Every structure is written in C-alpha cells, then in structure tokens.
Image: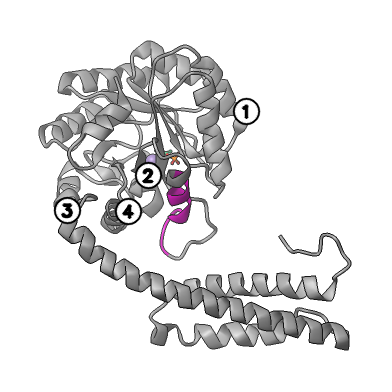
Amino acid sequence: MKLQESINNNQGPYLITGPCSAETPDQLMQVCVEIAQNKQANLLRAGIWKPRTRPDSFEGVGAIGLPWLVEAGKACGLPTTTEIANAHHANAALKAGVDVLWIGARTTVNPFAVQEIADALKGVDIPVMVKNPVNPDLELWIGAFERLEKAGIKDLAAIHRGFSFYKHPKYRNAPNWEIPMAFRQRCQDIPMICDPSHIAGKRDLLLEICQKAMDLNYDGLMIETHPDPLKAWSDASQQVTPKGLGKLLMNLVLRSSESNETIEQQLQEFRDKIELLDDRLFDILSSRMNLSKEVGEFKRLNNITIYQQEHWAKVISKRMSKSEDYQLTERFIRQAMDAIHQESIRHQTKVMNPNLPNSETP
Ligand code: PEP
Ligand code: MN
C-alpha cells in the first residue's frame, strides 16, 4: 500500500486506530469490526511486541498475534500496522503480510537498532512510520528517517508521541510541540501523525491534544482503541472504546488550512500589525543588549563577575509575578527571560574578555 498517498488523499485526519496490544484473536476482530463499521480507521494498529518499562509487564503476545492482526484487517477491509523493534520483528511482520511498519519511541532512540531495521528492509517496498525518540532530540528523530531513506524506504511518516519527562504535571509524556513543528520545517514532505494516547496517558485528556494537533495542521491521529479498555493488558487508562472514539471525533473541530483571497487579505492586515510589533520588540531587544554591553564594561572596570545569582532571581521572579497581568504563562516568561539573559551574557562576555578568541557562550 502507499501510505503518503493515502494520507494526502484522505478527507479529514488520517486515522490509525486499534488496541495498544493484540491480546486475543477475538479482541482484535471485535474492535476492528466496530471501528471499520463506524469508519473510525484508515489503518488498523496493534502492538505485537511491546517494549515495556518494567520486566513484569505484559510484553506482547509475540509473532503468534501477527495473523490475528492481518486477518482482522482483511475481514474488515483495513490495512494493518504494527511496531517493530529489530530485524527479526521486521522480517516476521513482512512475512505475515502487515502493510505498514512503525518504529517505536524506545527504538528510534537507538541508532544501532534503527540501522538494523533499515538494513533488514533494504529493497523492500513497505511504508514505515517513525515515532519520535523518547528524549527530545530532533536530530536523532531525523537521523532515523535518513537511515531508512538510505536503505531505499521512501514512503515514510512521522508520529509525535511526546517525550519522557520526570513527573510531568499533566501528561504521561511532555508534548514539546516545538519539536514536531521544527521537524515539519525540516522535512516538509513527511506527513505528521499525532499519537495523543501516549502523550496524554489518560482518556480524558485525548480530545484537547487531538484538537491542538488538528489546529497545528497535523495529517492524522493514532488513537488506541480497545473493546473494553479497563481490562486492557497494556495502557488501560489511555485507551477508548470505539464509542468513546466516536464521541471524541464528533467533538473535534476541523478547520481548513486553505483560505480564499478575501480571508487572506484580512489576515494580512493582522499580520502587518504583528510585524510592526515585532519590529518594535526587536528594536527594544537591541537597545537592551547595547545597555548590556555598557554594563559589561562597568563590571570589567570594577572587576566583578557577570552573573549575580540573587539579582537574576529577583529579575525573573518580578516578571513571573506579573504573568496574570501579561496573560502569559510562567513557562513562557521564564523561557523568554532565559533567552534574553543568555544573549546579554554573551554581549557582556565579549566586552569583558576582548582578547579571548572564543569568549562567546554557545
Ligand atoms: C504503542 O504505540 O503502543 C507504543 C508502545 O508506543 P511508543 O513507542 O510511543 O511508546
Ligand atoms: Mn500503548
């Protein structure tokens, strides 16, 4: 099958649904029949080999589940996909007739494993989807695509499933939306699918993530769907029934990424105003940095260090305390102030150490 073509020709988000794990032939068939009847899938997913964090968790039924998946797909007219983590998985899935393969987050992180898979797929005409690595490393994610492309695999898609995070206040994995956005800037022909199930970790949070993905113009969604989620052998708290999936999809607002001339003109007026503000913003930043140079000169003459922790803590906390007035998140304020601070330190460093060749901070 042609994956990119199917995604690009699809009306609305391309849907990859099905259980986290294949458990029994009945479980797979039941969920597949329902999602096919309700037109809730373009591609049927099920994990056969499950890389789990702890050794006592269910690690998948193994190769015995491959024919269950392929047969459920055939019975309902749906192509199928499963996760592969090594060359042995790749060969077994190909032999069973799985239509699309995906590389999971815990495998993308390992260049040796990705290379092994790429070598196993050399000369094979099969689409491959690559989830982001568990760590927030854009280059590693892109590197996995390069390995596959070098092996002749051209029909590729990316899946954003979030990044490992110690005690995220809300989600199982931090979305870090800026990383998939940067990926799309760099690899414009590769479709981007969002996997809200593994970002959220909880059913109740799926809709808000799906909506954000749609508003960011993602091409599709991979949503774990189980006939009886509470009894699922893996990821029970994030899976939804086909009925729950239907409700979620009904509540999703789909907006067009294309507009007409009148809308474009009106939009341009807003953009012009924003550009004027950006002009002012950067003029102010530039003046601020000129002051930083003067401060650097003063510190050099008086022989004091650039960084004074107490002072900087005060500067940050003053701005953060105004987050409600500004209607900006504390996270944004901290990031913006940190970026300004780094640039200021760079200017001061240059002034204070004019004779050092590499005095710029990275
Ligand atoms: C999955 O899709 O079930 C899975 C294990 O995903 P990830 O690689 O994102 O953890
Ligand atoms: Mn899962």
Q: Specify which label sits upstream in the sequence, 4 or 1.
A: 1
The residue beneath circle 3 is 260
Distance between the alpha carbons at the discs numbered 4 and 2: 26 Å
User: Mark 3 or mark 1: which is in front?
Assistant: 3
Give the crowd class for mark 2: few <14, some 14-19, many >=20 residues within 10 Å.
Answer: some
Whole-percent x, y for residue 13 in the image: 23, 42
Q: Which mark is residue 235?
A: 2
Q: Specify which label sits upstream in the sequence, 4 or 2.
A: 4
- Kindly identify the amino acid type of the residue bearing the numbered disc 4: Leu
Distance between the alpha carbons at the discs numbered 2 and 1: 27 Å
Q: Is residue 257 above or below residue 9?
A: below
In the rendered structure, the answer to whether residue 147 lies left or right of residue 160 reads right
Give the crowd class for mark 4: few <14, some 14-19, many >=20 residues within 10 Å.
Answer: few
Distance between the alpha carbons at the discs numbered 4 and 1: 32 Å
Q: Specify which label sits upstream in the sequence, 3 or 4.
A: 4
In this view, the residue in front, 100 or 311, is: 311
